[in-house]
Amino acid sequence: MSNFRHKKIVTKSGVLKTPFFMPDATRALVKFLNNDDVKKSGIVPMVVNTYHLFLQPGMETIKKAGGVHKFMNYHKPLLSDSGGYQVFSLIHKNPNMGKITDNEVIFRSPTSGEKHIITPEKSIQIQFDLGVDMIVCFDDPPPNNYSKEKISKAVERTIRWAKRCLIEYNKQIKKRKLDDKTRPFIFSVVQGGEYVDLRKRCIDGLIEVSNEVGRDWDGYGFGARHVDSEGKFMEKILRATASFIPEKSLRFALGVGNPEDIVRCYQMGWDMFDCVIPTREGRHGRLFIRNKQSKFPISNFQFPNKSKNLNLKSKKSFYETVSIRNNKFKNDFKPVDKNCDCELCKNHTRAYLNHLFRIGDPLGMRLAAIHNLKFYAKLMKELQEM
RNA sequence: GGGUCGGUGGCAGAGCGGUCAAUUGCAUCAGACUGUAAAUCUGACGACAUUAGUCUACGGCGGUUCAAAUCCGUCCCGGCCCA
């Protein structure tokens, strides 16, 4: 039972076809890569982060640069995340780092200790100053293991803040004289943890907000982690949440995910994805290898719904991973993936990459990240062509 | 030749009577990573059994002591200083 779909969205910086994956260029770069590395891997859009760029280099610099596209010299579609996830995660992990009230979030910079305040309005203003193509509401993302009561409160706050975001959004559109061709797309975020009824409530609330303010959300994001407190993929919740989101709106699965999670979400009707996995795991020496025997065998792929360990690394899966630091690659002179034409696989052997990781040279991390991005890009292309 | 300091597990380097199979770092082996406080983090790392436990180990040999990597004697080896 697939609900997948193909959409085309036209942003001021270019056209995107769904489904698409965005690597996280949190601080205006994908770590260790330059823009060409990303482009060559076949990836176009990227995600930058409001919170991180606000702290460094700071908005004065970004504004003087003429926006984040110019600042990082990347003129393809960019989405900015609101910073809600970062600020809340900071405070949830260490309550001394800040204070959350219904009006605002006060927090300390983990690096400088300096005190900052972010409100929903301010997050939106910053995102307009970034000048990106897609922006996200400042939400309240509770950890999945919070009580239902606490998550319910987070849902209500997320809805109230979404309203403030959308009102501010309209103000900024007016103030900056933007039109439908030049305005950024705006996404609200759906919270509700592992509870279908709360997810439903959140979406109903968000739709009500859009009616009250008089502007539709361009899309809805899936908030909080999409794996439950035990690490299991939240199949039911993701499926239900996708079905609650209006058909015409984009569905953005924030933070999703590993390859099988992306495929599953796609089949449920999610359109957009971003995740640190390909780049972070690449930097940590884990490489994705497509299973050679076929195209991504998605149509006949059996998802073992319930188990945490999906066993997708077995022969049945469409991919496997290798830890290139492992000793067994020390004298392995094959390419990482003989069917891959990325910079790494075209030019270097597993033994060489193993060596680069053993000596800790950044080149290894860069090549591995490029390879993994290419793997993701190819996956998305196959999904687009389904 | 005289004096002096030292020889500890793959390496570096703690420990200086019992709680030491021995702190720590590196190296090694494996694992984790999901809107990036992540070039990060976790675990293993004498042998065999692998729950318990048993053995062999802090240069060699011999002592003191209920007990020694730790104290004493001696031998071997190395650094530095003086002749």
Image: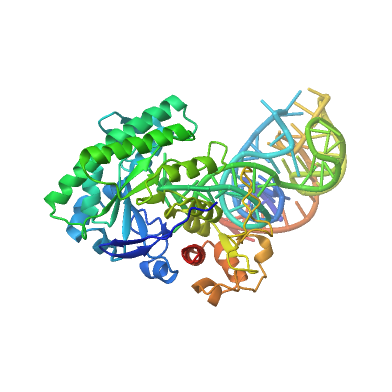
Q: Position of residue A215 (x, y in %)?
A: 23, 45
At a point 53% along the width and 41% down the height, the residue shown is A236
**Above or below for A20 versus A99:** below
**Above or below for B54 versus A125:** above
**Above or below for B83 versus A139:** below
Asked which quadrant contains residue A291, the reply is bottom right
The answer to whether residue A250 is left or right of residue A232 is left
At a point 49% along the width and 58% down the height, the residue shown is A278
Of residues A137 and A93, the one drawn nearer to the viewer in this rendering:
A137
The answer to whether residue A105 is left or right of residue B54 is left
At a point 21% along the width and 60% down the height, the residue shown is A181
The answer to whether residue A355 is left or right of residue A198 is right
Q: Position of residue A11 (x, y in %)?
A: 28, 61
Of residues B9 and A370, the one drawn nearer to the viewer in this rendering:
A370
* Residue A256 shows in the view: yes
* Residue A113 shows in the view: no
Of residues A32 and A241, the one drawn nearer to the viewer in this rendering:
A241
